[in-house]
Image (tube, rainbow, N blue to C red):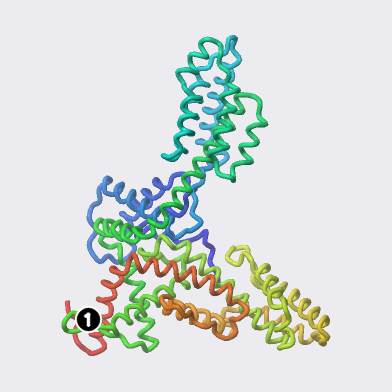
Amino acid sequence: MSQNPDKLHSSEERLSGLEDGQEENSDNPDQSVRKRIRQSAHRDDTPKSSPPRPVSIEELMETAKGVTNMALAHEIVVNGDFQIKPAELPEHSLEKKVRDIVHKAFWDCLEAQLKEDPPTYDHAIKLLGEIKENLLSFLLPGHTRLRNQITEVLDLDLIKQEAENGALDISKLVKFVIGMMGTLCAPARDEEIKKLNDIHEIVPLFRAIFSVLDLMKMDMANFAVSSIRPKLMQQSAEYERKKFQEFLEKQPNSLDLVTKWLQEAADDLAKLGHEMLPPHSNDGATGGASTLCFAAVQNQAYLKLLKWDHVNRPFPETVLMDQTRFLEIKLELEQLLLVGTVLLVTFSAAGPALVDVPGFAEKIKTIVKVLLTGTHLPSFNLKESLATIGEKVCAEVNSCLSQHGFTPFSAERETVLKGQIQAVANPDNTICRLIDSRIQKFLENYLASSHQKTLPAIPGGLGPIQRELEEVAAKYVRLVNYNKMVFSPYYDAVLGKILTKEESQRVGKPEES
């Protein structure tokens, strides 16, 4: 039922590298994007709407930079938890070994200088200069008093003179630095600042100071990101559309997968008997019915993403940056499907006596959710988990029945309930398919009413998972609405051709070229 997210089809064929912007911790995202862009320029495994043209290295690099910037802006906007984090090199990588060797050599040199008689402060003064620049970078324009304090105490010319005359007190300067860091740091760093006061050797103290300064830089960067997010939200749709247009001009076939995706959605609606209307009237004006038809096809296309084969099928170009998010939503819905089915089977077997018992539904749901954790992993054994769930649920049901003066299940009824729960593993299970169709219908209604104040009612049988389902639906609709905001002009152009073709075939007229 589920797929391993670690085996996602890379979709290098179209708009390669967009999703790299979602991994802010990657070692070198720009390099990865460029690599995948180069791969996309040479792959040819899908029909092209126009013949390929030679692409220069300069164009590839420029495109890669644009894609990287667009992916970063997109990530900041759609991911409310986005944070810049320090890069962590692999433990046994060559880059980490070289960095550690260079750092050790520098700190060993500093220690040797300070142990000389008299001490040499050349390296120490350079470090104080870097610390001064870092502290000043944290200040806002109105921090005049703090700026004057830092400039006065960390006056490098005066410090050099004191060193030459043997009057330099490094400990006093370091104490000032720690105090100033405590003033400027975020509350979350107070513990790190306290630890600095417990270090009494100069070299380890300098190392620790720079480590905390790096953390403060990250805090400052993340504060800046959170500050610009509201403004970026207003401009990002236009920015992403512009960058995608630039990419499209360099790769004219970059809407092939989108066209196929929307065509399939239109075909699905045609099979369901939806009337396909022409997108334009005779005078070229867009009709209201046609607009509804556009919206219906788009919503159907977005619903198809929740059933997408991420392993064997490339993702449409315009939603590629959000492939990981759509996969996460798909996996959440698959787990909710299992949870909802098991709960419905359990409550049906327990009868009305226990459904209204305070806390009973939540307790059963917690048991089921815990035992279904990791359903997307290749090592997960659904049948074994459902067998365990059957045992736990039966025990809990009998315990609750006894506590409230009801007769516990007989061995026969337990066997029946366990069998029904284990049958959920079958993809063709009737109850499972019923719950799935109701979840899909709820999401369809949620999409259709996303701009209305009144949200759709939860279908029957989904009450026990209503809270979780609404949370997933809200996340899904936010993602869809933002994607529509960015790429609607492209969808309208593609759907115009598709629906005109459908109308021509319906009325028996030859399609206009």
Say which of 261 and 39 sits in front: 261
Say which of 409 and 235 sits in front: 235
Residue at 48%, 16% in the rendered image: 160
Instruction: Tell me where residue 411 appears, x and y as whole percent.
Output: 81, 84
Secondary structure, mark 1, is loop
Residue at 76%, 83% in the rendered image: 414
Say which of 295 and 288 sits in front: 288
Q: In which quarter of the image is the N terminus?
A: bottom right
Instruction: Tell me where residue 72 appears, x and y as whole percent.
Output: 40, 53
Instruction: Tell me where residue 161 appears, x and y as whole percent.
Output: 48, 13
* Position above or below: 330 against 90: below
Instruction: Tell me where residue 196 appears, x and y as whole percent.
Output: 63, 33
Q: Characterize the local packing of mark 1: few (<14), some (14-19) or many (20 or more) Cα atoms within 10 angstroms.
A: some
Say which of 483 and 429 sits in front: 483
Residue at 67%, 78% in the rendered image: 422
Q: Mark 1 points at which residue?
A: 280
* Position above or below: 425 against 169: below
Count of picture labels? 1
- Asked whether residue 411 appears in the rendered view, the answer is no
Where, by quadrant of the figure, is residue 359 drawn? bottom right
Q: Which amino acid, by three-letter code, is at mark 1?
A: His
Residue at 25%, 80% in the rendered image: 279
- Asked whether residue 27 appears in the rendered view, the answer is yes
Q: Quadrant of the C terminus?
A: bottom left
